[in-house]
């Protein structure tokens, strides 16, 4: 008589999810890893030194944990926040005073601060241990991009409370965009790029600051643009690069040490 476990493994539902049985040799282990949506992020084989626990501050893992906490708390905050000037400020006040007793918003806020600190400490550890050298130079580049994305997540989230501090802080930040080389109206070499007929390519309505704010000043369009960047575009890009980052760590032999 077939046991319950054997019966379950013989069903069409089980076989449609798990294409391979228990891996018992190198070939079946490779097939099991390559056919799993979660395991295929890891290389098939790693060196023993790559999975050995060592003292590395664990700031990379802590940053990833904070990213997950920010994602979950951010999704919950989206149920209560409306990114329009009429309601944005009052929604934030309600989130601080009434919704979940203000705990949810404070978790998201302080988690963002902690994530900034953790990723800077992680980058400092990686730099001081020389882990940007071959064969990890590609992963160092991915880490630098993740650092920039984390800073942009913080910058775009700063406007969402829609109070005076947020509006003027983003005004100062976007004015810095005007000084971008080639792409900022007030930046160096902004008059180099010309369209046919001698028409300037960079104007007050086509430079980096206008692209960021969707206007010449902080307004309704900027609030919606920052909201979409903060809640969708930047988190998706960060999640993809984190997966690449982790996969490459395993591929390069695990957590790096002094070189």
Image (cartoon, helix red, strand yellow):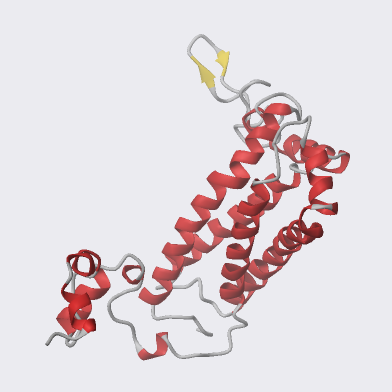
119 is higher (above) or lower (below) than 30: above
Name the residue rendered at 62%, 82% in the picture.
Answer: 57
Name the one closer to the observer, 147 or 109.
109
Residue 12, by quadrant, is: bottom left
- 218 relative to 208 in the view: left or right: right
Name the residue rendered at 24%, 67% in the picture.
Answer: 35
- Toward the top, the furthest residue is 197
Q: Is residue 187 visible?
A: no
Location of residue 145 in the rendering, given as x and y in whole percent from the top left corner? 54, 56
Name the one closer to the observer, 102 or 246.
102
Name the one closer to the observer, 100 or 125.
100
Name the residue rendered at 60%, 59% in the picture.
Answer: 72
215 is higher (above) or lower (below) than 242: above
Location of residue 149 in the rendering, given as x and y in whole percent from the top left corner? 59, 53
Name the one closer to the observer, 150 or 197.
150
- 191 relative to 42 in the view: left or right: right
- Toward the front, the furthest residue is 1
How many circles with numbers are drawn on the protein? 0
Q: Is residue 220 visible?
A: yes
- Toward the right, the furthest residue is 164
Location of residue 74 in the rendering, given as x and y in whole percent from the top left corner? 64, 54
Name the residue rendered at 18%, 87% in the picture.
Answer: 24
Q: Quadrant of the N terminus?
A: bottom left
Location of residue 47 in the rendering, given as x and y in whole percent from the top left corner? 34, 86
29 is higher (above) or lower (below) than 92: below
Residue 200, by quadrant, is: top right
């Amino acid at each position: 008589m077939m046991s319950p476990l054997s019966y379950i493994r013989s069903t069409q539902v089980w076989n449609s999810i798990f294409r391979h049985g228990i891996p018992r040799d190198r070939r079946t282990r490779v097939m099991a890893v390559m056919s799993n949506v979660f395991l295929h992020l890891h290389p098939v084989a790693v060196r023993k030194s790559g999975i050995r626990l060592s003292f590395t501050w664990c700031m990379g893992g802590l940053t990833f944990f904070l990213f997950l906490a920010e994602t979950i708390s951010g999704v919950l905050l989206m149920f209560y926040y409306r990114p329009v000037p009429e309601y944005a400020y009052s929604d934030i006040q309600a989130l601080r005073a009434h919704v979940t007793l203000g705990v949810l918003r404070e978790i998201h806020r302080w988690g963002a601060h902690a994530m900034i600190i953790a990723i800077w400490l992680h980058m400092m550890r990686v730099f001081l241990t020389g882990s940007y050298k071959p064969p990890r130079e590609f992963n160092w580049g991915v880490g630098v991009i993740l650092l920039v994305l984390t800073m942009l997540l913080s910058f775009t989230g700063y406007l969402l409370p829609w109070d005076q501090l947020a509006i003027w802080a983003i005004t100062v930040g976007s004015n810095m965009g005007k000084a971008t080389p080639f792409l900022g109206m007030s930046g160096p070499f902004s008059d180099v790029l010309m369209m046919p007929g001698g028409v300037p390519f960079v104007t007050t309505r086509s430079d980096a600051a206008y692209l960021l704010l969707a206007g010449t000043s902080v307004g309704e369009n900027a609030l919606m643009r920052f909201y979409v960047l903060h809640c969708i575009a930047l988190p998706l890009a960060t999640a993809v690069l984190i997966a690449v980052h982790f996969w490459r760590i395993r591929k390069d032999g695990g957590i790096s040490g002094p070189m």
